[in-house]
Amino acid sequence: MINEFDERIIRYYDKDLSVEEAKAFELELQENADLKKEFDFYGALIEGIKTEGALELKEYIKEHIKSEEIEEQSNLWMYAAASIAFLLLSYFAIYSYLETGNIKEAAEIITLKDQKSSKFKFWKKNNSTVNSKFIDSTSAYKDSMLSLEQSRQTDTLLKNAIAAVEPIAEDINDLNLSASVATESTKDALSVEQGMFDQDEAIALTQVILIPIKLKETENSESSTSAQAVNPSSVNRMKELTPTKKSIPRITSSEGSVLEKINGKDSLDSKTQSKAIPTFSKFKLQNFEDEKGEVKISISKGKNPSVLEITLFNIWGVNPLIFEISGSYYLDLGPSGPWVEKSGSGIWKIPNNTGVFYKIEWVKNKQIIEQIRN
Amino acid sequence: MPSQTETTISSLDRLKQGDREVLIELYKENERMVRKYITENNGSSDDAEDLLQDALVVLWQNARKPDFELHAKISTYLFAIVRNQWLKTLEKRKRENGSLETAGEGNPDFIDESRMDLKIVRDYLNDMGELCRKILLMYYFDGYDMQTIADANQLANANTAKSKKYQCLKDLGTQIKSKFNLNDFLS
């Protein structure tokens, strides 16, 4: 019997009854207790459905708010990580710039891209062909720099003296001498020359800029056939300046003919040498200590053909300097060093060819040694 | 940039179309204001969250009513619901406890989850088939019309949906009646 009420009750709740039907139903509700119970029962069902819907919707809102908060937190972490990465990158770039003084190189570091993985690497590409660990040897060369600076100052005096006697010596064509030595301290010069130098790690670099001493023989000299006077001045000058020149400790020059006579073994004939050995406007010296500990010297030409790059491996020279004597170049690592134990002079004749030299043969010719050291 | 009125109309339209994402947007837009009000009036952050969610539920249900008209911004409407409900909650707690000291404890009872009869209905509703459950919720909670319900549930037409809804409600009643005495259930 109660079930018979169902349809009207449901229609009443659904507002499907007409106004008259609804009024009649409401009157009946007041009189019929069973109908009222059934009516309340359906009311509870509908209220329960609404409650379930409301709770479900609230749960939906909660879950979405929560997931968005988590996402925002993740984004915060991501932003934090990105910021840290950016700061590290900036630090690295600035550090690199301060180290190399080369903004282009610093930029290369931070933009170097691994083509395979399409990921950015934050380290620097090693262009070096030598697996070596560089040791800052700047301090070891300070004395050398000082010495060379003194030489340069003395040389300036020499130049002034030459200028003073030049008019007098114009008609004398015995020997022609012009000499100067310039040095640049390490880092300033490095920043300029960095592009020409493949050793990326070369931070402390000793440069010896040599404007070679050209000694040209006179026409009546025995070995003057190919020598051309750069400055057709002056036997007198030479003669007069010889004592002064001897006071220059490191950069020295001597008459090619004399050397040739003295040093048939170590000195090349000036005729052939002037053709064979180019004149280098600059030498780059740098000192490395590699892991193998092998003593060797590497010679290569820089991008600029007039620059000769000399890398010393595991050789700890004191005051390393370059000398030119009659067209031959000599590297003087100083009188004291490991070579002393094996009676080595510490003076090495820079060979005509480039390459890596493992067996260092020291100059034995006393005259040359004396010429350089004195 | 749309005006606030345009935003309100847009949001209401989306609500009528059943876009629940609007609720999340409205929650975020109004959360700070509601939280400030509730926490300054003896409530907690949990109370604020609960009340705002309840207010959004009310908005969701009302938005689809044919006679529903909104003459203010949605945020004003939501705040009015929250404020009224919170005052009722405070009054109820004051009556029950004699003081406001416990006002921050527990959830506001906007939606009464404590009634046993409603819990039984919800349990049985969730035990029903998915189609019945969905039709009943769409009709009685969401307030969709029969055509929308028919379309959403791949039913032939509105009449089919109406018959199905009637049958589902009757089945729910029958299930509960088979387990409970009507007097006990309603007491």
Image: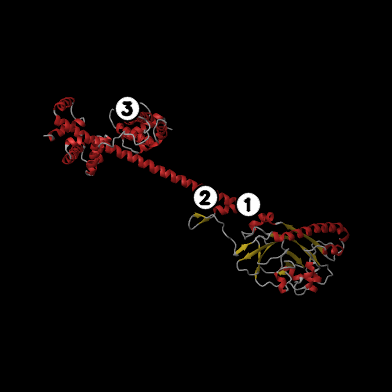
For the residues labelled 3 and 2, the Cα–Cα distance comes to 53 Å
Report the disc number at residue B69: 3
For the residues labelled 3 and 1, the Cα–Cα distance comes to 69 Å
How would you rate the neighbour count of disc 2 (Cα within 10 Å): few for under 14, some for 14-19, many for 20 or more? few
Question: Quick check: A90 left or right of A327?
Answer: left
Q: Are marks 3 and 2 in contact (CB under 8 Å)?
A: no
Query: What residue is shown with label 1?
Result: A98
Where residue B77 appears, x then y in whole percent? 36, 29
Q: Secondary structure at mark 2?
A: helix
- Chain bearing tag 3 is B
Which label sits in the foreground, 3 or 2?
Answer: 2
Q: Secondary structure at mark 1?
A: helix
Residue pictured at 30% horizontal, 40% vertical: A56
Badge 3 amino acid: Glu
Question: Quick check: B151 left or right of A70?
Answer: left
Where residue B43 appears, x then y in whole percent? 39, 33
Question: Quick check: A48 left or right of A191?
Answer: left
| Outermost right residue | A168
> In this rendering, does residue B48 appear at all?
yes
Q: Secondary structure at mark 3?
A: loop
